[in-house]
Amino acid sequence: MMKFAWDNYRRYAFGKNELRPLTKNGHIGNMFGGLRGATIVDALDTLYIMELEEEFQEAKSWVEKSFDLNVNGEASLFEVNIRYVGGLLTMYYLTGEEVFKNKALELGEKLLPAFNTPTGIPRGVISLGSGMSWSWGWASAGSSILAEFGTLHLEFLHLSELSGNPVFAEKVMNIRKVLNRIEKPQGLYPNFLSPVTGNWVQHHVSVGGLGDSFYEYLIKSWLMSDKRDTEAKKMYNDALEAIEKHLVKKSAGGLTYIAEWRGGVLDHKMGHLACFSGGMIALGAEQAAEEKKQHYMDLAAEITHTCHESYTRSDTKLGPEAFRFDSGTEAMATRLSERYYILRPEVVESYMYMWRLTHDPKYRQWGWEVVKALEKYCRVEAGFSGIRDVYTTTPSHDNMQQSFFLAETLKYLYLLFCDDDVLSLEDWVFNTEAHPLPVNHTNIKAKASMQ
Ligand code: DMJ
């Protein structure tokens, strides 16, 4: 599947950001500020890990010869960080090749002006040429998004470590400081924060889109620090406790889900994006107090089960973008606009963590169901495509092979069927785009064992 996705990208869209598999051309989009090759940088480590040697060499040579950082467009700080900086850092750690380190550092420098705000909370959009930054037009009152400014920590610590320049680490540690200072409604973190005043702008809380990877990076910061960053662990524990108290619910049919919260009112909806949380809670269970470990493993298993239900209840056996638990509905989309599937990884991501942490064979079976469904409904003549409606067996295709399909979905599926020592969870922490970064104690050991 990886070879098929890559070969088609290479044939029809090489150097562009994504492949359009129906029209057999490339897509550039406006998320990466004029940077190109998003699929190349996102796919590099998957090609490498899968030992697709020839394909990897070609991708690497594109980075060496054609990856131009002197661009002048408007980029999402978050997307450039998780896909490009994360992907390049991983490749440096896996191969030791300087080109990856140099590109990661050069790009990291270009992101720094986004932090020039009164609070030091970065804005969401940055011009990679001028360094000017601003907030997304759709984000209320010029706010910054929790999942965006909260998903920089892992990469920025590595940028400081590799460059010897503390500035990257200082920027992300300051974000923590601001978050620790500010009062949280019921202990919850709203999704919108003003980078000017440092106050919350709207009380919308979600473990799905807009909030998701902020929580993920708290627990992973602790793990990546070789369990020394106790502040991150405490923030994660407190946040998860509040989430459990206020957002975790059980449906009439016995399915556990995480609702969204709008100023105290629950919206009984779970996004596909929120399905990463099964894996996150399982990963974090180990660090919980002895008497809570089993509780969190059970919660993780229940949420993963619910996300699996959102897949099995559809005709294609792929899950919708969002599913609901109201008016008699359970784990299904009720709105036409929420029925699509864009090759997202979060559900197989949780299967991979649950498999590694429990070895219950059902997670491999569930992963195999996804493989079959992808082959049946998303494979088209020239690549893999998202589909517009998971509830029809003759779905129309959205003509987009997302770069995260190669970075995450296929990598997590592969790891689900590998031995546990391939990118062991003891030695590696996956960034939110599934790019593995080494745990601090193991930089050298991990690199040696991969080689
Ligand atoms: C990816 O870019 C990352 O997983 C991110 O955290 C959320 N969105 C996509 C995949 O769905």
Image (tube, rainbow, N blue to C red):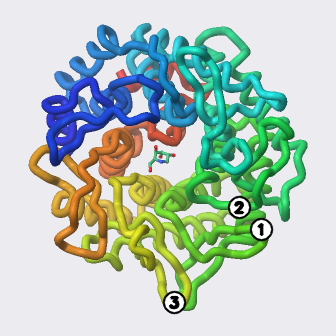
Q: Which residue is mark 3?
A: 253
Which numbered dot is residue 263? 1
Q: Quadrant of residue 95?
A: top left
Residue sitting nearer the eye, 154 or 111: 111
Marks 3 and 2, the one that precedes in the sequence: 2
Whether disc 1's CB lies below 8 Å from ligand 1 is answered: no
Q: Are marks 2 and 1 in contact (CB under 8 Å)?
A: yes
Q: Relative to residue 379, is residue 333 depicted above or below?
A: below
Residue 393 percent location from the top left of the image:
19, 73
Q: Which residue is mark 2?
A: 204
Q: Quadrant of residue 294?
A: bottom right
Q: Is residue 436 visible?
A: yes
Q: Relative to residue 225, is residue 92 depicted above or below?
A: above
Q: Which residue occupies 59% across, 27% down?
A: 126
Residue 372 percent location from the top left of the image:
20, 62
Q: Residues within 10 Å of mark 3 (few under 14, many from 20)?
A: few
Residue sitting nearer the eye, 445 or 131: 131
Q: Amino acid at mark 3?
A: Gly
Residue 197 percent location from the top left of the image:
86, 39
Left or right: where does residue 57 sit relative to residue 323? left
Q: What is the count of numbered marks?
A: 3
Q: Which residue occupies 63% across, 16% down?
A: 161
